[in-house]
Image: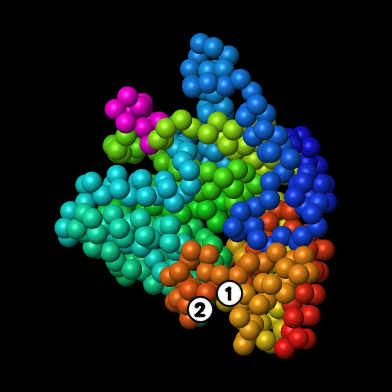
Amino acid sequence: MLGGVQSRYDVAGLRAQFPALAEGAAHFDGPGGSQVPAPVGRAVAETLTSAIANRGRITAAERRADDIVLGARAAMGDLLGADPGGVVFGRSMTQLTYDIARTLAKSWHSGDEIVVTRLDHDANIRPWVQAASAAGATIRWADFDPDSTELTAAHIGAVLSERTRLVAVTAASNLVGSRPPVAEIAKQVHRIGALLYVDGVHFTAHAPVDIAALGADFFACSPYKLLGPHCGVLAAAPGLLQHLHPDKLLPSSDTVPERFELGTLPYELLAGCTAAVDFVAALSPEPHPQRRDAVVAGMRAVEEHEQALQQRIETALAAMPEVILHSRAVDRTPTLLVSIDGSPCGEVQAFLAERGVNAPAGSFYALEPSRRLGLGDSGALRIGLAPYTDDSDVDRLLSGLTDFLKTR
């Protein structure tokens, strides 16, 4: 039993391992970064206070650093269904996407086309827009249906051509939760010989990930959205990375994936990543000899738990005619974007915060979908569920919204 979590999905037992929850707030702010369980914090602290050095195999300190890096690559490989040899660590998903965009753009020319979508977080839009501009390539925009908040394969197909070099798409919208059919999109993209870059930041926190099944050439995520520390991860086939040559220091390693990692890695954060994956594996209802299988089962348990709470919230919101639910896709994560007719979203956030309910308001760097939905740059109130959310949290949220409506 990893991390001390019970063999079934026991949310009370799970919550006991999150020191932050002792402060008493009901956290619906997970899409911006989840709370962290104690085993992850211990892994970070113990690594920081251990004898450690630059990676090597001679001294104990060198071996410790090397083992931590290799262990973290293996852990993220198990989380994502990726080859550990293609797991790249960086400061953030945004930084990694900028790095890959600049690297790929070295081979782009005038007439080449790059596809981005109106549904994506700006971190999977602006790096491509700017890299394409620098290379003289053209940006093509794939729209989504603002009524259903769905982005379909047809939306992507409408802007593909023989000149398309890369398509950047989200696996799940961090604003409204919509989950595009990435595997179907991948087939279209690969049929014309282009690459697919998938923003998996929001998706990874709510569902099992299988990069091969998705058909993603590049898959980027952020461990801190799923119980881990603040850093970014990019996963790709090692053979693909072998053909890419990012700008780097002359004496730094040219091997894959090290050639993409600038400077010394944050060993303490990588140790925290491994601990977070182990924690997720421990959520599996049944034991599994392989961590990858346990991770998949654990995330399925998380998905089932969150969906039950999501359904309860949506049923209650449907009985509040003043509340507008902007998350309407059939396939989506348990992330609800709502607004209250006639009330600034910041007012609702502040009212809930006074009652110990943390539900932030804004567009959350998802400017394009917020604008497309008619919400401008201010966005709306985002209610995000997490593995540690329980019925008492939902009670407080719904009570707070009810009380706010009484003040109008």
Q: Position of residue 364 (x, y in %)?
A: 53, 64
374 relative to 79, above or below: below
- With 231 as the anchor, is 357 left or right in this view? right
Residue 375 is tagged as: 2
Q: Nearer the viewer, residue 174 or 403?
A: 403
Q: Residues within 10 Å of mark 1 (few under 14, many from 20)?
A: many
Residue 185 within the magenta-colored segment of the rendering: no
Q: Position of residue 214 (x, y in %)?
A: 46, 51
Residue 277 is tagged as: none
Q: Residue at x 74, y 77 (%)?
A: 401
Specify the amino acid type for callout 1.
Ala
Q: Residue at x 17, y 60 (%)?
A: 111
Q: Residue at x 30, y 58 (%)?
A: 130
Q: How is the image coloured?
A: rainbow
Kindly tell me whether residue 188 is visible in this rendering.
Answer: no
Q: Quadrant of residue 144?
A: bottom left
Discs 1, 2 touching: Cβ within 8 Å: yes
Q: Residue at x 48, y 81 (%)?
A: 374
Kindly tell me whether residue 198 is visible in this rendering.
Answer: yes
Q: Residue furthest top?
A: 58
Instruction: Give how far apart the Cα atoms at labels 1 and 2 are.
Output: 7 Å
Q: Nearer the viewer, residue 2 or 38?
A: 38
Considering only order in the chain, which callout, 2 or 1, is on the residue closer to the N terminus? 2
Specify the amino acid type for callout 2.
Leu
Q: Secondary structure at mark 1?
A: strand
Residue under circle 1? Answer: 380
